[in-house]
Amino acid sequence: MGAYLHILNLYPDLVEKAQEYNYPASSVCILSGNELELQQKFPETYANLQSCKHNRDRRTPFEYGRDLVASWLFEDFLMESLSNAGLIVSGAGADKNREVLPATKVSSSSDCIVSYNGKTRLLELMSDYNGYWAKYGKMELRDAKFQKMKNSASLFLGISTIDNKYILLDMNKEFESTFIPSYSLYGHKPAYSIKLPKSSMKDLDFPQLADDIKNMM
């Protein structure tokens, strides 16, 4: 099940939520589920979706688009919640304007920048919708995302939506990892499997999460 259906359980009206966050009309159209309307009214966005073959894995272009825009909504909810908890958070990724980009402009840059008390870190956001991290004590990161986060000394925030827990990692630390040349769930693209520290999952509480981030700054 993709991000769209999982996040639909959190926000029954995704279109209304996207409009609340002032998403561009093309992205709102994707969430409405009308592929023909997207093709007719927003041909450039439609073409951009067609170009993202590497990112969509086994999904159709439109399925990938709905998952992508829905995941942005969850990211914005997380950034808003962290801001309300006392951090300064802003979008940093290539898609920070919430418009679907062509494949040539899609990057694996971190999702946002978090600041506190004069210090700044890149923050990568990721969601687990089925409890995989807690069950197996590991997570898989596609392509070169793991190495890029380590090189940029990013923080990693993972949210497990099924049990309302979070994991926060300082990617500047050392982790036990295994390179996977061809990972089936990512369309046989390369990935890194990262062993997660024991008892690393915590109940999601944004003031506590904000304090954990502050302690890692």
Image: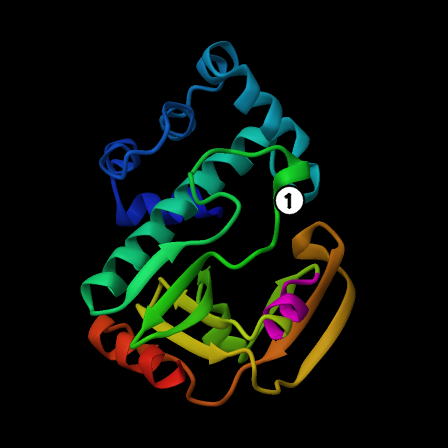
* Quarter residue 12 falls in: top left
Q: Nearer the viewer, residue 168 or 99?
A: 99
Name the kind of residue labelled 1 in the image: Asn
Q: Position of residue 197 (x, y in %)?
A: 51, 87
The residue positioned 29% from the left and 64% from the top of the image is 88
Instruction: Specify whether 194 is left or right of 13.
Output: right
Quarter of the view holding residue 125 = bottom left
Q: Is residue 54 magenta?
A: no
Residue 164 visible, this orientation: yes
Residue stretch in magenta: 144-150
Q: Quadrant of the C terminus?
A: bottom left
Name the magenta segment's main secondary structure. helix
Image position of 108 with respect to 101: above or below: below
In this rendering, is residue 155 above or below 55? below
Q: Residue placed farthest to the top in the image?
A: 40
Instruction: Pick the residue in front: 133 or 47.
Output: 47
Q: Is residue 129 visible?
A: no
Residue at 24% across, 71% down: 206
For the point 35% across and 45% down, the residue is: 73
Residue holding disc 1: 55
